[in-house]
Amino acid sequence: MINDAYVENNRVKRQAWLIIPLALIVIGLITLFGDFEDDGLFSTNPATVVTSTPDGMELDLALVSTSNGQSWQTEWRPPSSQAKQQVTLSLSQYAADYKQLRLQLEVRAEPGSSQRQKLAERLGAALAQYDLGRVEPSAAPPATLAPLDNGVVLLCAEADSKFARRMLATLAPYLGGRVIVRFDAEIPPQTMRLYLSGKLYFNVHGQATFDDVESQQESIDS
């Protein structure tokens, strides 16, 4: 009986010591990600499917919260340190999860705007860091997408739709708002093409959107 009590006492002590490193891990994670949650850069669903058809889908990428009355503006803004870190962490995890697939996102900006080109380069640089894509020479969306050429359009194979949705979610701190995804049988597998066109707006975090946030804000103010 004495031996059993001794063994049980030692087992309880060992379990108690195991709690300490687990607590330290939890504290470390809270410290690492706490700023993102406070600034509203994390979303439980950063890429929401608005509509879905056999030809594609419309996504809504979450817009980063802008507190203290900070509004959207047309002047270029660099990404905040929080946005950079969140994109880096998300892309790193994306690359690890799909490392065998060699997924690539090609980013193209419609000619005629230095801001669109700079945004394309920002996205391309983030992707290139993990060999997930690159910026391509300026180009307008294909003529077949003419009705959709004001904003963000992504082309991919239908089989790659889940990869496209998650890829867009990882880039949401840099690019928010409406995105049209169209399935294209001529696109090679594991390849996605992102086209940027239209008028850009930026918030304090440097997140860009092609949504008409200016008109939306006027409606709210009135």
Image: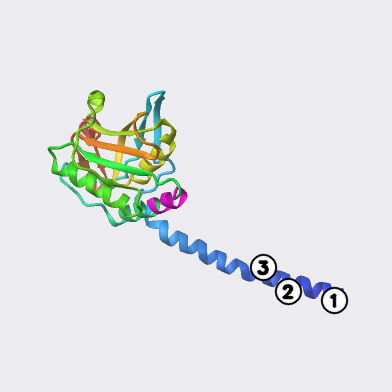
Question: Which residue was labeled with disc 2?
Answer: 10
Query: Which quadrant holds residue 60?
Result: top left
Q: Earlier in the sequence, mark 2 or mark 3?
A: 2
- The local crowd at label 1, few if under 14, some if 14 to 19, many if 20 or more residues have their Cα within 10 Å, is few
The residue positioned 22% from the left and 45% from the top of the image is 119
Q: Nearer the viewer, residue 213 or 123?
A: 123
User: Circles 2 and 3: CB distance less than 8 Å?
Assistant: no
The residue positioned 40% from the left and 44% from the top of the image is 43
Question: Which residue was labeled with disc 3?
Answer: 15
> Relative to residue 66, is residue 36 drawn left or right?
right
User: Which image quarter holds the N terminus?
Assistant: bottom right
Q: Earlier in the sequence, mark 3 or mark 1?
A: 1
Report if residue 193 is visible in the image: yes
User: Which image quarter holds the C terminus?
Assistant: top left
Question: Most extreme residue toward the left, as rendered?
Answer: 112
Report if residue 37 is visible in the image: no
The stretch in magenta equals 91-99
Question: Which residue was labeled with disc 1?
Answer: 2
Residue 39 location (% of width, % of height): 34, 51
Q: Does dot 2 land on a helix, a strand or a loop?
A: helix
Amino acid at the residue labelled 1: Ile
Q: Nearer the viewer, residue 131 or 21?
A: 131
User: Circles 3 and 1: CB distance less than 8 Å?
Assistant: no
Residue 7 location (% of width, % of height): 78, 73
User: Circles 2 and 1: CB distance less than 8 Å?
Assistant: no
Residue 110 location (% of width, % of height): 18, 36
